[in-house]
Amino acid sequence: MLSFHTGLPLHITQIYNTTDSQGGWNAIAKQFLGKTLEDTGGKKGGVIAGRSYPRRFNSKLVSVEAQRRICELSLLDYCCLNIPLPDVCKGAHYTGDDGEKRDLFCTLNSNRYIQPGILPNNTLT
């Protein structure tokens, strides 16, 4: 999550694309060390060796309930980064404080902090 337990946003200095982790590590090295890292074949001081293939899993095996729970828990991230919710998470599937079913949404409070409109319940179902 990109927020503290208080709901305040966590300051992020960089975001990197995981499909190019080698490039991301080199960008960090260049920024903080002044030079890019060389691959030393797994020896200390080199770039962290990654997989030669992307990490994948079959998302069709994740239940709709689990996908909606993930959306509920990461709602603040979707709002702060202005990323649209996945289709499975759209619609009145979530129970608000008043017990009514609602869509997920965010609000801007009087202190100008982005707050989730529905707080995740603390029970795992």
Image: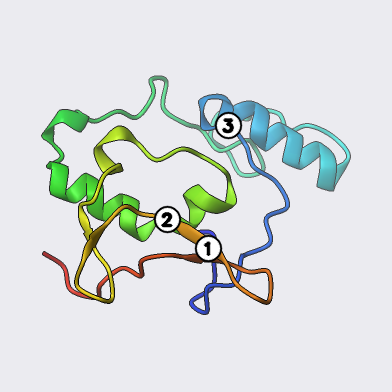
Name the mark nearer the viewer: 3 or 2.
2
Residue wearing tag 3:
17
| The quarter of the displayed image where residue 57 is located | top left
Question: Callout 1, which amino acid?
Answer: Thr
Question: Callout 2, which amino acid?
Answer: Phe
| Residue at image point 15% right, 39% down | 62
| Residue 23 on image: x %, y % | 66, 27
Work out whether residue 50 or residue 76 is closer to the camera in this orientation and state it: 76
| Residue at image point 30% right, 33% down | 87
38 lies left or right of 54: right
| The quarter of the displayed image where residue 20 is located | top right
Work out whether residue 12 or residue 50 is closer to the camera in this orientation and state it: 12
70 lies left or right of 59: right
106 lies left or right of 36: left
| Residue 52 on image: x %, y % | 42, 20
Work out whether residue 79 or residue 44 is closer to the camera in this orientation and state it: 79
- Compared to residue 8, the image places residue 25 above or below, namely above
Badge number at residue 107: 1
Question: Callout 3, which amino acid?
Answer: Asn
**Outermost right residue:** 34
| Residue 42 on image: x %, y % | 53, 35
As measured in the structure, the alpha-carbon distance from the residue carrying label 3 to the one carrying label 2 is 26 Å
CB of mark 1 within 8 Å of CB of mark 2? yes
- Compared to residue 61, the image places residue 45 above or below, namely below
